[in-house]
Every structure is written in structure tokens, then in C-alpha cells.
């Protein structure tokens, strides 16, 4: 019996492995599931509130499918010597420890600052690093290169940082507006570009983010990368495929813009809304079909070329046969348990941090607006349904009226020619406490919305506090814009924006309770100091209130005069809410 048992050592080893190795395997799956679930949950906030990134909901499923395809032809795991094994464990421990430790500050900051996109990139990079590290530890270099693409595919669904996205959006809007207007003129439709707007005989048509191509541009990147991986194209052919997908998306958006201009000119501007979404979905379908055809052509031409018989030292025949996975070693189970405990500690610890500090937060002074209905040309503004669907506010109102005033800098001069007619627009929005309240509140800002309507930003005059009553002040950021028209004098706009939260820390609130947290920092984003303050004070998921005032004039209006008008406006229309008041 002993002689018969001797040759069966590999089978015994396999049987023993079958009893024990599933433990680290199960721990590996559990660790990766927890890691990716937290990332997807964080990114889903942007996918839910920002229509540009709604395609992100499909990316995890695509990535998982691509990983499964790669698993079918995975290469043979790398065979390491004992010395190399020790070195590999050391490298894995150092990189893994650094990545795991980084998760703690990342989670602390992104909970308090869900709109900070740079953190989303850091979080995604950390998760991808840990995943690839586990694969490298299991299969070595061959596995690392083989599975890198499906793991890193998640980056296509991470929102672009604002400094990159904003110039792309505004640049595409200008290009599309000019090209669409010129094309409309060629086919006999009178059209004139006014910033990012196109004037036709029936009125003005806006070229918003969707028409600019940014949404289909990002979707085309995902589709191009997806089909390139499905066809296993070479790097150069994948680049060509992605470039082709982007070209199809931009051309399709150009056609849609011309079509909508024709609709606005021949029917009415309101009719554009009915066709807007239909045309948008048609673009996505066109990009998908066009990219699929292009991928087929590129893959067909590449298949005619002879392929190398050996890739990374492994024959293609062997690569097509499922190979036994080199699972993490038995000793790695302890590391995986430790990593899982750390992930649990990070989530429980960050939640506890904010829950403890929330008990120290006090309700800020709530304010409301008493509309100046007695002023000249006062009328309530109807907020477009598309804007409502994007901002998803709980309360929202807008109004407009006119002011005829003498610039205060010329108040001593009786010359009536200096009188200036100013159009005043006032918007009020409120979001109840929730995970996406901060994300939604930051979608409606002057430096984002006005350039989308053809305005060019001239200056950012920073933040100043404006008194309301009883020592209570609101901080407003002041922006200056200009919009030019052919044969008309340019318009000047001074926009004031205030974002406040419902609750504040007792450490940052004076004894009289007059402090209100607002928006500070460069442009309309918080500085690192303000973001750090939100973390230290444990402020998360708070209700947001936004008040935005815009003064538009065809005549000269200085920054000082605009601030004087806002000072008067705040004193006249902003009123404090009583405790428990909801309207």
C-alpha cells in the first residue's frame, strides 16, 4: 500500500490543496469584492446626478466580462525561485501596505467632499493597484500584463477633473456652435452665433454640454476601448479604433446640432426640446454601430498577419488551454485577513468619525427670500424641466426684474445719460441632507452655467461677506462676464454666488450664531484648507442652500457698483427663517 501511495503524492497534494487552498481563495474574492464595492458606491454618486457619466453604470459589468474572457486564456503562472519568492513577498507587502494606508485619508476626505474628483482618481488608482498586486502575487509578471487592461478599464468611468473637463466642454460648445451655424447658412437657414448660442429666426438655441459632444465623447472612449479589447487588437490599432470612435461621435454631434438648428428655424425653439434626447440617443447608437464596424475591419486586417508562435515564453496553444491557477500561498491568508480587517476598520472608523462629530454640529441660521414683487418688470422665472432633472433640487425658484440706476461712482453728476438699465436675475435652490446634496449643489455655478450660455469670464473678484440683518452675513463669490454680439454693444454681467450649509461646527460658530459656512477658494471650488476643515469638523451629507444673483447691463457697470447693488438686494430680499419653517 505504501508503494501504491508513493506515486500518488501529486494527487494527495492536490486533494490537500482542495481542502485548504479555497480559504485564501475565498478571502481573495471577499477582499476584492469589498474593495471594488466601496469604489463603485462612491463613483455611483456622480453616475447618478451627472448625466454625462451615466454610462458609468455599465462599466463594472463590462470590466467583469473582459476579465472573464482574459481568464479563459490566462498564461501559465510564473515559477519563482525561493529567493525570488521572498523578494516578491517583500515588494507586495510594501506596495500593499502603502495602498491600504492611503485608503484611510482618501475615504475621510471623499465622504466630506464628494465633488472633489481628484480623490476619485486617487481612490480608483489605489483599488486598481491592490487588485493588480494580488494578481501579480498569484501569477507573476505574465498575469500582471494579461489582466491589466480589464482591471484598469474602470478609469473610463471616473469623472474627469474640472481643470480638464471644463475647457473641453466649453471648447467643443464653441466649435459646434460655429460649425453648425455656418452649415445652416450654407443650406439656406439664417443663423448667427452669439457666444455658445445660435440665433435663428424663431429665437435663440443653446448649445449645451450634451450638444457639445462631451457626453458622447466620453462614451465613445469607452466603446472604442471595449471593442479593441474584445478583438484583442494591437496597441496601435486600439489607438486608431479609439480615435475613430471619437471622430464618429464628434461628427454625429455636428449633424445633431445642424438638425436641431433646422428644427428651431423651421418650427420653433420649444420644439427642439422634444427632439433633443431622441437625437442624443441616436448618436450613442451610431457611435456603437460605427465603432463595431471599424473594430471588425481592423481585426480582420490584423488577422491576416502571421502571429508569433510564442508570447511571453508561452505557446499560443497552451494559452488557449485553461492553466491551473497559482493561488495565493497558505501564508498569505493571514495577510488577506489583516487587509479585510483594515478595510472594515476604514469604513467603520470613517463613519464613526462623522457620526461623533455630527453630535457637535449646530443648526445654522436658515434663510429665505422675500421676492421684490413691487419692482419694475418683476416676473417669476420658470425653471426648465431639463435643468430640474439635472439639479434635482428639493426647492427651487427664480425671478427677474429691472433696475434703472445711476452708477454710484457718478452719483454727484446730474447727467441723466449716465443712467443704466440693469436686468436682475435671482435664483434660489435648496437640497435636503443626503449623500449627493453637495454634488448636486456644485452643478449650478456661474463659472459653469454662464459660459455654457455664451458668456466669457473676465474676472473672479473673490469672496466678500454681505450683511443681512442682526449681524448675520452671507459670503458671496463675485464673477464678471462679458458677451459680445455682432452690430450690438457687448453685455456685462456680474454674478454673485453663495453656497451655505445647514449645520456648522460649534468651534467655527460664534456665540451669536451668525456664522454660515460658504464657498471659498480658487474659482468656485474649496481650497485644501476648507476641505480639511470639513473633515476635521465632521461635516457630511448636510443640506445645501444656494443663492445666485446676476446683474446684466449693456452699459458700463463697475465691480464696486455691482457689489453695491448686491448689498442693497441682500438687505431687501433675504430674510431669516424661523425654527421649523420649511418655506
Image (tube, grey):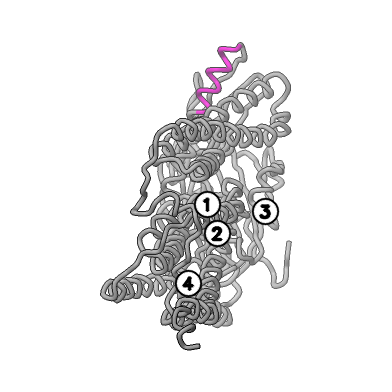
**Front in this rendered view, residue 218 or 59:** 59
Q: Which residue is mark 2?
A: 43
Foreground mark, 2 or 3, reads 2
Residue 79 visible in rendering: yes
Quarter the C terminus occupies? bottom right
Q: Of label 3 and label 1, which has the lower sequence position?
A: 1
Q: Position of residue 271 (x, y in %)?
A: 73, 29
Q: Which mark is residue 93?
A: none
What's drawn in magenta, residue-wise?
176-187
State if disc 4 and disc 2 touch (CB < 8 Å): no
Q: Earlier in the sequence, mark 2 or mark 1?
A: 2
Instruction: Answer yes or no: is residue 471 visible.
Output: no
Residue appearing at x 69%, y 50% in the figure: 397
Q: Which is more foreground, mark 3 or mark 4?
A: 4
**Mark 3, residues whose alpha carbon is within 10 Å: few (<14), some, or many (≥20)?**
some
Q: Based on the picture, tell me whether residue 100 belongs to the magenta stretch.
A: no
Q: Which residue is mark 3?
A: 392
Whichever of callouts 3 and 4 sits on the residue coming sooner in the sequence is 4
**Disc 2 and disc 3: Cα gap in Å?**
18 Å
Q: CA distance from mark 3 to mark 4?
A: 26 Å
Task: Determine the residue positioned at 42% across, 77% down.
Answer: 329
Relative to 336, residue 188 above or below? above
Question: Which mark lies nearer to you, 4 or 1?
Answer: 1
Distance (Cα) linking label 3 and label 1? 22 Å
Mark 2–mark 4 distance (CA, rounded to whole Å): 15 Å
Which residue in the protein does label 1 denote?
157
Q: Secondary structure at mark 1?
A: helix
Q: Is residue 266 left or right of residue 314?
A: right
Give the residue at x 43% y 67%: 130
Disc 2 or 3, which lies upstream in sequence?
2
Label 3 element class = loop
Amino acid at each position: 500500500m505504501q508503494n501504491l501511495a508513493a506515486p500518488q503524492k501529486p494527487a494527495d497534494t492536490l486533494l490537500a490543496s482542495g481542502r485548504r487552498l479555497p480559504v485564501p481563495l475565498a478571502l481573495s474574492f471577499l477582499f476584492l469584492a469589498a474593495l471594488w464595492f466601496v469604489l463603485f458606491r462612491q463613483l455611483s454618486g456622480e453616475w447618478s446626478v451627472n448625466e454625462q457619466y451615466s454610462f458609468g453604470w455599465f462599466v463594472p459589468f463590462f470590466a467583469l466580462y473582459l476579465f472573464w474572457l482574459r481568464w479563459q486564456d490566462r498564461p501559465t503562472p510564473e515559477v519563482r525561485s525561493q529567493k525570488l519568492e521572498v523578494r516578491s513577498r517583500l515588494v507586495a507587502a510594501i506596495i500593499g501596505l502603502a495602498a491600504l494606508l492611503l485608503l484611510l485619508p482618501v475615504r475621510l476626505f471623499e465622504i466630506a467632499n464628494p465633488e472633489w474628483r481628484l480623490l476619485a482618481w486617487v481612490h480608483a488608482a489605489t483599488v486598481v493597484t491592490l487588485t493588480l498586486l494580488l494578481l501579480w502575487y498569484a501569477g507573476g509578471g505574465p498575469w500582471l500584463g494579461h489582466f491589466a487592461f480589464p482591471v484598469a478599464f474602470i478609469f473610463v468611468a471616473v469623472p474627469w477633473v474640472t481643470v480638464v473637463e471644463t475647457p473641453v466642454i466649453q471648447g467643443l460648445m464653441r466649435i459646434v456652435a460655429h460649425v453648425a451655424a455656418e452649415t445652416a447658412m450654407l443650406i439656406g437657414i439664417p443663423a448667427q452665433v452669439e457666444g455658445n448660442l445660435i440665433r435663428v429666426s424663431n429665437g435663440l438655441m443653446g448649445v449645451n454640454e450634451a450638444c457639445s459632444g462631451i457626453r458622447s465623447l466620453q462614451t465613445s472612449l469607452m466603446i472604442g476601448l471595449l471593442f479593441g479589447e474584445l478583438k484583442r487588437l494591437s496597441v496601435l490599432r486600439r489607438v486608431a479604433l479609439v480615435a475613430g470612435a471619437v471622430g464618429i461621435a464628434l461628427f454625429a454631434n455636428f449633424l445633431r446640432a445642424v438638425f436641431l438648428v433646422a428644427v428651431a428655424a423651421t418650427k420653433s425653439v420649444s420644439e427642439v426640446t422634444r427632439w433633443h434626447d431622441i437625437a442624443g440617443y441616436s448618436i450613442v447608437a451610431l457611435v456603437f454601430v460605427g465603432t463595431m464596424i471599424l473594430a471588425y475591419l481592423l481585426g480582420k486586417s490584423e488577422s491576416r498577419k502571421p502571429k508569433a508562435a510564442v508570447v511571453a515564453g508561452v505557446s499560443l496553444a497552451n494559452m488557449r488551454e485553461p492553466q491551473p491557477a497559482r493561488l495565493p500561498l497558505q501564508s498569505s491568508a493571514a495577510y488577506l485577513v489583516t487587509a479585510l480587517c483594515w478595510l472594515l476598520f476604514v469604513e467603520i472608523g470613517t463613519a464613526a468619525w462623522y457620526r461623533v462629530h455630527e453630535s457637535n454640529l449646530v443648526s445654522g441660521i436658515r434663510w429665505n427670500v422675500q421676492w421684490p414683487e413691487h419692482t419694475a418688470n418683476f416676473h417669476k422665472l420658470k425653471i426648465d424641466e431639463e435643468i430640474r432633472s439635472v439639479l434635482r433640487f428639493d426647492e427651487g425658484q427664480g425671478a427677474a426684474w429691472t433696475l434703472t440706476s445711476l452708477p454710484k461712482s457718478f452719483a454727484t453728476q446730474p447727467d441723466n445719460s449716465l443712467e443704466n438699465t440693469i436686468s436682475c436675475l435671482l435664483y434660489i435652490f435648496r437640497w435636503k441632507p443626503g449623500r449627493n446634496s453637495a454634488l448636486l449643489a456644485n452643478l449650478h455655478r456661474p463659472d459653469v452655467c454662464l459660459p455654457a450660455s455664451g458668456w466669457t469670464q473676465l474676472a473672479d473678484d473673490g469672496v466678500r461677506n454681505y450683511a443681512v440683518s442682526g449681524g448675520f452675513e452671507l459670503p458671496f463669490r463675485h464673477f464678471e462676464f462679458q458677451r459680445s454680439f455682432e452690430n450690438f454693444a457687448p453685455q456685462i454681467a456680474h454674478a454673485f454666488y453663495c453656497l451655505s450649509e445647514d449645520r456648522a461646527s460649534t468651534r467655527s460658530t460664534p456665540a451669536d450664531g451668525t456664522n454660515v459656512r460658504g464657498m471659498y477658494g480658487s474659482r468656485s471650488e474649496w481650497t485644501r484648507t476648507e476641505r480639511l476643515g470639513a473633515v476635521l469638523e465632521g461635516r457630511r451629507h448636510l443640506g445645501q442652500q444656494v443663492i445666485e444673483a446676476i446683474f446684466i447691463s449693456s452699459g458700463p457697470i463697475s465691480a464696486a457698483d455691482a457689489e453695491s447693488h448686491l448689498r442693497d438686494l441682500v438687505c431687501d430680499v433675504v430674510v431669516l427663517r424661523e425654527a421649523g419653517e420649511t418655506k
